[in-house]
């Protein structure tokens, strides 16, 4: 089987080869400080005895699992600590597809491109279900699309790339559809701390044996390089997921888990609100420039991405490269996220140069 390199890496490679200054708005790498307690946790770990530098429990350290379980209101035995939310999603998707009860995977279009890539890698057949034009979940479209051949539905809220925060009642309806067709729902909530609307509610509040929730700390603690995430499984799926995790990865970084634990203990409500306020300010700055450029755009209710459509400038890789060459701004092509927004571009507002990028775009499209 041949795997296609994600367009993220293609765009980043093109940016890396540029000989002029480029504002990078491609990937969701937070540019702000992690909690000081997390840094202290790393310094603390460096002084531990050699036995703490060896394998941790495969499914995660007891301390971090207990902290997550307490915060999320679940039994620690249902928690698997993973190598980022990416592996958490992989484990959840694998749990659905290995049951041999169908191979169809329903994905909301536009979609984070790693979901269809993982689905195909696991032998699934992705089917794209268009979102409403505002990015919200179209339950009627899911009701029409789902069948007894559907093994899995993947939802992501707050959403990358649209910034939509799905109505909780709609998420529950999709979970109930999964129950009716013996499918599993994997709900990726990695941007839960970036709910700008105040309306987000976790799918963990939905009582269902067909629901898996994934998340992590890459975004919320500004540590994408640490690769510490987690999945919360129904009890009947947890042991198989732990076994697959052990066979694929053995375990997740022990120092990283310790630092995350300290970071969680030290990150108060003010830490998360400061990050959200920074994003709100950047959204205002960026969308003001898009108004000046005459663009149509999505204003995120969550996460930190803006999608924009410039008249006569579709979201192709060629146009992304032209924008890098001529405007000095790098975004993602809409065609990389499916078909629904293939004439749009996506920009990550995780750079202190948002205002500069906005000015460059306004001038380019004037």
Image: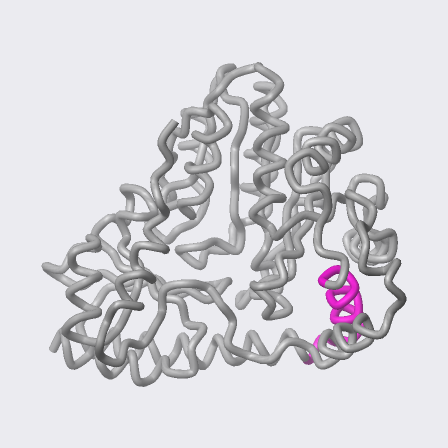
Residue in the image at 54% along x and 41% along y: 170
Q: Quadrant of residue 15?
A: bottom left
Query: From where the camera sits, is residue 311 visible?
Result: yes
Estimate the x, y position of residue 322 in percent, counting from the top left. 15, 65
**Left/right of residue 200 with respect to residue 352 in the rendered view:** right
351 relative to 173 in the view: left or right:
left
- Residue 316 as seen in the image, left or right of residue 240: left
The image quadrant of residue 4 is top left
Is residue 194 highlighted in magenta? no
Residue 266 is a magenta residue: yes
Name the residue at 64% across, 50% down. Answer: 83
Question: Percent position (x, y) of residue 118?
Answer: 48, 36
Residue 198 shows up from this direction: no
Residue in the foreground of this view, choosing between 178 and 326: 326
Picture coordinates of residue 110, whole percent (x, y): 36, 46
Residue located 31% across and 68% down the image: 16
Query: Which residues lie in the magenta part?
Result: 256-270
- Location of the C terminus by quadrant is bottom left
Q: Position of residue 297 (x, y in %)?
A: 29, 64
- Asked if 100 appears above or below 155 in the picture, the reply is above
Q: How many marks?
A: 0
Front residue of this view, candidates 171 and 71: 71
- The one of 172 and 81 positioned closer to us in this rendering: 81
**Vertical relation: 231 (above or below) 198:** above
- From the image, give the main secondary structure of the stretch colored magenta: helix
- Give the residue at x 66% y 53%: 229
């Amino acid at each position: 089987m041949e795997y296609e390199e994600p367009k993220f890496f293609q765009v980043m490679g093109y940016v890396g080869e540029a000989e002029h200054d480029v504002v990078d708005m491609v990937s969701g790498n937070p540019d702000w400080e992690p909690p000081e307690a997390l840094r202290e946790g790393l310094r603390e770990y460096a002084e531990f005895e050699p036995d703490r530098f060896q394998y941790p429990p495969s499914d995660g350290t007891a301390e971090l699992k207990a902290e997550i379980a307490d915060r999320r209101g679940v039994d620690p035995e249902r928690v698997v600590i993973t190598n980022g939310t990416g592996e958490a999603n992989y484990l959840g998707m694998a749990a659905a597809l290995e049951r041999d009860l169908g191979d169809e995977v329903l994905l909301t279009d536009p979609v984070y491109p790693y979901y269809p890539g993982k689905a195909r890698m696991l032998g699934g057949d992705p089917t794209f279900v268009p979102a409403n034009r505002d990015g919200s979940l179209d339950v009627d479209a899911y009701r029409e699309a789902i069948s007894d051949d559907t093994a899995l539905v993947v939802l992501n809220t707050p959403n990358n790339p649209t910034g939509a925060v799905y109505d909780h009642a709609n998420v529950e309806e999709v979970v109930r559809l999964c129950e009716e067709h013996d499918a599993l729902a994997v709900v990726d909530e990695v941007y839960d701390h970036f709910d700008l609307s105040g309306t987000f509610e976790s799918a963990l509040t939905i009582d269902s044996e067909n629901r898996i929730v994934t998340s992590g700390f890459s975004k919320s603690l500004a540590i994408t390089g640490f690769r510490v995430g987690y999945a919360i499984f129904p009890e009947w799926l947890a042991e198989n997921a732990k076994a697959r995790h052990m066979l694929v990865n053995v375990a997740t970084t022990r120092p990283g888990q310790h630092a995350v634990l300290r970071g969680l203990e030290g990150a108060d409500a003010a830490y998360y609100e400061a990050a959200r306020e920074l994003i709100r300010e950047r959204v205002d700055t960026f969308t003001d420039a898009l108004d000046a450029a005459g663009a149509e755009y999505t204003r995120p209710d969550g996460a930190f991405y803006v999608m924009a459509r410039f008249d006569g400038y579709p979201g192709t890789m060629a146009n992304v490269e032209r924008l890098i060459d001529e405007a000095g701004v790098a975004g993602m092509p809409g065609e990389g996220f499916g078909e629904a927004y293939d004439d749009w571009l996506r920009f990550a507002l995780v750079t202190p140069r948002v205002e500069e990028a906005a000015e460059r775009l306004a001038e380019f499209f004037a």
